[in-house]
Amino acid sequence: MTSVKWRGFASTTRLEEATRIFMEKARFEPEPEVIPVEEAHRRKLVEDVSSPLDLPGFRRSAMDGYAVVASDTHGASDTSPKTLRLVGSSDIGETIVKSISEGECMKILTGAPVPEGADAVVKVEDTDQLEEGFIEVYSPVVSGRNVAEKDEDVKQGTLIFKAGRILSLMDISLLISMGITEVNVYRRPRVAVVSTGNELVPASQKLGIGQVYDSNRPAIALWAKCLGAKVVTSTSCEDDPDTIMDTLARIIPHTDFIITTGGTSVGTKDYMEEVVSVMGEIWVHGISIRPGKPVILGKIREGNSEVPILALPGYPLAAFLNFENFGQEILARWTGFRNPRSYTDVILNQTIPSNPGIRDFVRLKKCGESEDGTPIVDLIRITGAGILSSLVLADYLLEVPEDVEGYPKGSTVKVRVLDYTRL
Amino acid sequence: MTSVKWRGFASTTRLEEATRIFMEKARFEPEPEVIPVEEAHRRKLVEDVSSPLDLPGFRRSAMDGYAVVASDTHGASDTSPKTLRLVGSSDIGETIVKSISEGECMKILTGAPVPEGADAVVKVEDTDQLEEGFIEVYSPVVSGRNVAEKDEDVKQGTLIFKAGRILSLMDISLLISMGITEVNVYRRPRVAVVSTGNELVPASQKLGIGQVYDSNRPAIALWAKCLGAKVVTSTSCEDDPDTIMDTLARIIPHTDFIITTGGTSVGTKDYMEEVVSVMGEIWVHGISIRPGKPVILGKIREGNSEVPILALPGYPLAAFLNFENFGQEILARWTGFRNPRSYTDVILNQTIPSNPGIRDFVRLKKCGESEDGTPIVDLIRITGAGILSSLVLADYLLEVPEDVEGYPKGSTVKVRVLDYTRL
């Protein structure tokens, strides 16, 4: 009667090795799609983009003042101003180019087209307007002064962005300024999130004995979305291998990455190992970390479609920690986003014990600050993977390596910053 | 004939002073709104939230194994195991609580309800199942071992989050795990973006002489959205004071913050000073920074509604820099998001000249790295507010204070990191 499921993990994989395997084997080869440029923030360019035109496209004044023939101003000074005849004005948005001759000038606004014949703009501060249609210039300008050439900003045909660039909102602004309305980008990774477990009930329902609210799934789905994924499915299903396999089979053809929660341990109702084995291939089952050991990395197949699967444990802290380790990292690679994980130094206010051979993840809370501003931290709780509140209340996460038996009180250690408002 | 508009800026305000004025005077007093908890990522709580129930709500096993009466296992060892009668199993999702008596045990999965009578769980690794409905226990457990109490995670009535907390996705998960489906949060700031200028044409149209594509507006709108604002209006209007005032008057009652671009300088077509004066009050016009001097901070009124206005210059670089200085900071304060601005040290590969009395913003590009990994940077361009591409291509922005006359080649300086994919 002793099932294989009751043997426990015969061996576990180190985190680095599991990460290496997953990053190497999990594939994403998205097709390009053409989308409106306004929607392309944080999307990855398929092709080089060159400017279809010169920018600004016309000679433009860089100052409010008067467009002049520069040589007319030579020798001008406060005591010996040069007088020029005012022959009109060039406004912003003018669609015809006017012209001036020697001895003439034209009132001009910053950004307005410089008239033909003019080769410089005198700042308004260096002039006085006389009543009779003339102005006085008190300071000379050299040719080209305060005039932006027609290709000053961007020259037609200039390579603007290389293929593979992650477009920012500034990039979008530059593309629009060149009249580009659509861009060819890689589509976003399509993610499905499936929670498994007979104990799960939706938050709208009253909780019975033995039941828990299905709270991992919406958070993982939201997290994946913040990381640039398109969440195509977010659903829940019963702890039954056939039901799970049916659910996954329907999802596979329309997705690039499946994340499940629950059923990854070695109890009788932990079907995910069986499901992944039957539907595809297990790369890793069991990682030498605590909490979070029972995670499965692999791929599953349906027809011609094959997708990587990250089967997370059902306990919230274990699920989130493994999603952070694997899901966040793979999505960052696929989208080109930077992984939002960040680190800082803290000082331990307590001794942190840890068993060798396993990597402990310890939740810490800020309780003070040293003289130089380094946070001083207390331990929240060493064990208890179900304790979601300990993660929510934690400010930092300390990773204690396999070969370290804890840290003494007063040590300065490097920790992950937990700020999930910042994704 | 010399209009006031042609006098230039009589005086300009220092950046810190302008910031102080704007942050002090620009008000946002949002009403609360009740929204589904799944949509509450990065939203600010109006009230304290306490747990409506105990979590997990039932005594739960923290291990796969056997629920036992702890005293039955005392003295158990490999050589002298204790034998217990197996009377059933407790599964995850069971909605009735079973019970055992002394001398009995029950197979139990991690997360399943612990039967009445049992006060500990023996790990499966420390047992062997015998064929005849009995198990052997090889290791003693103390009372409470591997059993999570019904309020271990959260006790009913416990204060979970204080009013004012910015909810993260982990917080949302915790709220859902307590059966909370809706939360009372402050509504998001409603932002309107209006570009002004006769020269502006939509990107779908062919560009004529003197025309430019309306590229600031979509980027500012997207930026505001990334900062947690709700963009209620994004529109463009002609350079005409009446048209601008009509447009703004229609927008004011439905918005909390208006951002315009264009028309802020001192040329004849720069109507924003007039518009803001007529419709409300100018707090600041002209800041001693370069680029970006001609910005207007103030408020405008329509009926009983009064909203702060940030009137940005039309030149992209000047517009973006001022939005970063004022718009980003005020929205961060209003939403409670952290201002995404970040700094790093770089080494200058060139001398940076700067005039005293003005704060120069200098775009820099990484061209190498020092031995310790500090970026080495080149200057992109000192002047030219219209040069959007210099901002897009820049990696860093150096702020040269008013009292500094530039920096020599080789200096290490602190710079803003420009990464607009990271908002």
Image (tube, coloured by chain):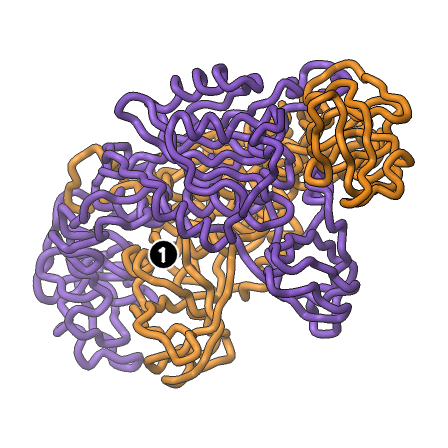
Chain colours: A purple, B orange
Looking at the rendered structure, the secondary structure element under dot 1 is helix
Q: Nearer the viewer, residue B129 or A387?
A: B129
- Give B227 or A360, whichever is nearer the viewer: A360
Image side of residue A108 versus residue B345, left or right: left
Q: Is residue B327 visible?
A: no
Identity of the residue drawn at 22% across and 49% down = A163
The reply, left or right, for residue B254 in relation to residue B412 is: right
Give percent across and percent down for residue A95. 16, 42
Q: Amino acid at mark 1?
A: Leu
Q: Quadrant of the N terminus of chain A?
A: top right
Residue B351 placement (x, y as % from top left)? 35, 82
On the question of residue B167 being in view, the answer is yes
Front one among A331 and B32: A331
Return the residue nearer the eye: A325 or B169: A325
Q: How many numbered dots are placed on residues in this image?
A: 1
> Which residue is disc 1 drawn over?
B317
Q: Residue at x 23, y 52 (%)?
A: A161
Residue B364 found in image quarter: bottom left
Left or right: B345 in relation to B156: left
Location of residue B72 by image quarter: top right
Identify the residue shown where x is 57% and y is 60%. Answer: A343
Q: Is residue B260 above or below residue B114?
A: below
Q: Is residue A138 left or right of residue B117?
A: left
Q: Chain of mark 1?
A: B
Q: Quadrant of residue A6?
A: top right
Task: Give the image location of residue B321, x and y in percent.
Answer: 43, 57
The residue positioned 70% from the left and 63% from the top of the image is A406
From the top left corner, tell me how far across and down residue A186 is, in percent: 27, 38
Q: Is residue B7 above or below residue B176?
A: below
